[in-house]
Amino acid sequence: MHHLSSGYLKKIKPYLTSLSNAEYEKLITDHDDAILYLEKHLGKNPKMTRWIVQSIGHYIYSNSKENFYVDYQKVSLTDDITYWCFQPPAGGCVHLFQTPQGKLLIDCGYGANYDDWCRILLEFNLGDFSDTRRLLITHGDADHCGMSGLIPCAAYMHPVTKKLLEDGSRGFAAVNDYPELVRTYTTGINVISKLSLPKKIQTSPTEKIGTRGEFPVIDTIDFCGLHFEVWESKGGHLAGQLFYYEPNFGLLFTSDCFLNPASITKPRKEFGSIPDYLITSVNINSRLAAEERKSLLQTAHLLDSKLKAEGKRLRLCCGHGAVSGFDEEGKVRIADSVTHFSYRPKGIEGLIHAGMKLSRIVKEKTA
Ligand SMILES: [Fe+2]
Ligand SMILES: [Fe+2]
């Protein structure tokens, strides 16, 4: 039993077509409960909540197909290994290594954008995903592992991430004031963004084999001359989050623990603020997330100094936004020039984003 109008349901139903009737009815009932909970306990206006939920699908799909775009950085690591960081309109960066032995991916965006990514690969002469040999997942949010099931190799992840995906709530293994709210949110975002669960999973070990700053190193992965260390996070953003570090080329994959906010465009920032409204924070433990960010940055500064002595610099390859580094004053700056690639005629992007009026979320948050 729910109180949602048929007009509203008509707006969100197109984003929920993968569900059976029973699953759809359950999600709608849970969604209605979540709206009431947000109003009663967190003072959120139900009209605004409905509008935001509707905006999730609207934003993802209105920025797909002929409206898809990427901001990318291309870094030639050797004569035949290239690292690409692609920022999609919605969701996490896809970090792609093109090597003579095929592709290695770190994270793989929303499932809903799979066709968009295939088109982008063709556009940049990168073939397709069939030669993907390694898929390294940082954490179990749908914007980072959404295409896992569509990539033809095992998805490497922390065993806690495997359990989190099986459990179905991003609140897994977390102390949480709003477990039902977080579970409904996770189901909603996973369904709307077409999360494709990995068909095959390779879990990381958990035993410490070394340390980097405060972070245990739990594994190493070698691929075509690339050598990744796997670091276990403290889990402030999400339980089971991993960082990857390639010491020879100085690439640190910080996932959602550290982003360069100045490199994230306004629509992406506004879309990224949706969890703050719907589940109070994108982090499962905000205090721990802040501590962890500080600690990761400290470690990054140390690594950068070490690399500098070898005539190299560290790159912070973030979960969202541009690949960045430290300037001479130690401030975070975009590291490599960012190029915008769009299928849209010039000027259209602004109009579509303005139509979204996602800035209302930000206004409401600060009101
Ligand atoms: Fe993310
Ligand atoms: Fe995340």
Image: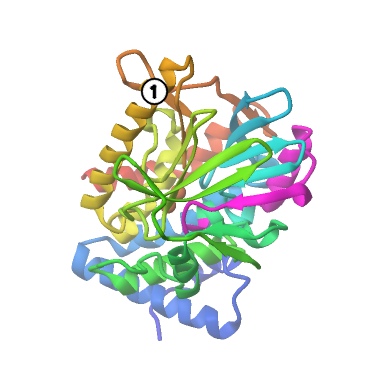
Q: Nearer the viewer, residue 77 or 278?
A: 77
Q: Secondary structure at mark 1?
A: helix
Q: Is residue 285 visible?
A: yes
Question: Which image quadrant: the N terminus?
Answer: bottom left
Q: Residue furthest front?
A: 209
Query: Can you say which quadrant of the picture contains the C terminus?
Result: top left
Q: Left or right: where does residue 136 sit relative to residue 133?
A: left
Q: Position of residue 158 (x, y in %)?
A: 47, 60
Write down the residue under mark 1.
306
Q: Residue at x 62, y 33 (%)?
A: 84
Q: How many marks?
A: 1
Are there few (<14), some (14-19), or many (20+) residues within 10 Å of tag 1?
A: some
Indicate the position of residue 120 as horizontal and vertical percent values: 71, 39
Q: Position of residue 34 (x, y in %)?
A: 33, 71
Q: Residue at x 43, y 65 (%)?
A: 160
Q: Quadrant of residue 121?
A: top right
Picture layout, residue 41 above or below residue 309: below
Q: Magenta residues, as a range?
A: 114-142
Q: Position of residue 277 (x, y in %)?
A: 31, 55
Does the magenta portion include 133? Answer: yes
125 drawn magenta: yes
Give the left or right position of residue 26, taking residue 173 as reference.
Answer: right
Q: Nearer the viewer, residue 24 or 222?
A: 222
* Residue type beneath disc 1: Lys
- Residue 191 drawn above or below residue 80: below
Residue at the location (40% across, 64% down)?
170
Report the front residue among 41 and 166: 166
Left or right for 331, reference 189: left
